[in-house]
Amino acid sequence: MELNQLSGRFLTLLCLLTLPLLAHAGVYKWVDANGQTHFGDRPPAQAASSEVEVNAAPSRTDPSAEARHQNVTRFLDEQQRESGRSSRQLSKRPVNSRRSRQSYAGNCRRG
């Protein structure tokens, strides 16, 4: 492996490992001079602020999306099985006769 490739891979790995640290941005809360509460990703310079812990709710999947995913997976599995069957059937067909080879070659040239 070249040094440039190794350096590039190391740099990519380093970036991927530090990404979660960057994604953990704080949320700040402060009250302005008019008594209005504000939230932001950076603390304001002129007001006292406190960092707020945000507890995100776990994501839920849509039941209809889950059903669609199962249907698509089932369909793709069936297509894969059928594809395997048809390729096995084609490989079992004898193409030994000269006439069938000529016919096959003629069809290929016409298409």
Image: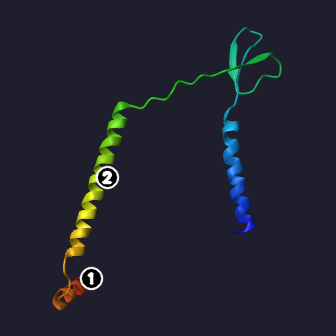
- How far apart are the alpha carbons under marks 1 and 2? 30 Å
Residue at x 35%, y 31% (from the top left corner):
63
Quadrant in the picture for the N terminus: bottom right
Instruction: Determine which residue is flagged by label 2.
Output: 76
Relative vertical location of residue 42 with respect to residue 47 in this rendering, above or below = below
Q: Is residue 25 above or below residue 102?
A: above
| Residue 83 sits above or below residue 37 on the image | below
Residue 39's x, y, as percent? 68, 20
For disc 2, the neighbor class at 10 Å (few under 14, some 14 to 19, many from 20) is: few
In this image, 101 relative to 34: left or right? left
Q: Which amino acid does label 1 sit on?
A: Cys
| Residue drawn where x is 66% and y is 21% of the image | 53
18 on left or right of 57: right
The circle drawn on residue 19 is none
Helix, strand or loop at label 2? It is: helix
Give, as a three-letter code, the residue at label 2. Leu
Residue 14 x %, y %:
71, 49
Bin the neighbour count of mark 1 within 10 Å (Cα to Cα): few under 14, some 14-19, many 20 and up.
Answer: few
Find residue 26 and report its image quarter: top right
- Of circles 1 and 2, the one toward us is 2
Q: Residue at x 51, y 27 (%)?
A: 58
Relative image position of residue 59 (x, y in whole percent): 49, 29
Q: In which quarter of the image is the C terminus?
A: bottom left
User: Horizontally, is 39 left or right of 55 in the view?
Assistant: right
Residue that label 1 marks: 108
Q: Residue 33 appears in which quarter of the rendering?
A: top right
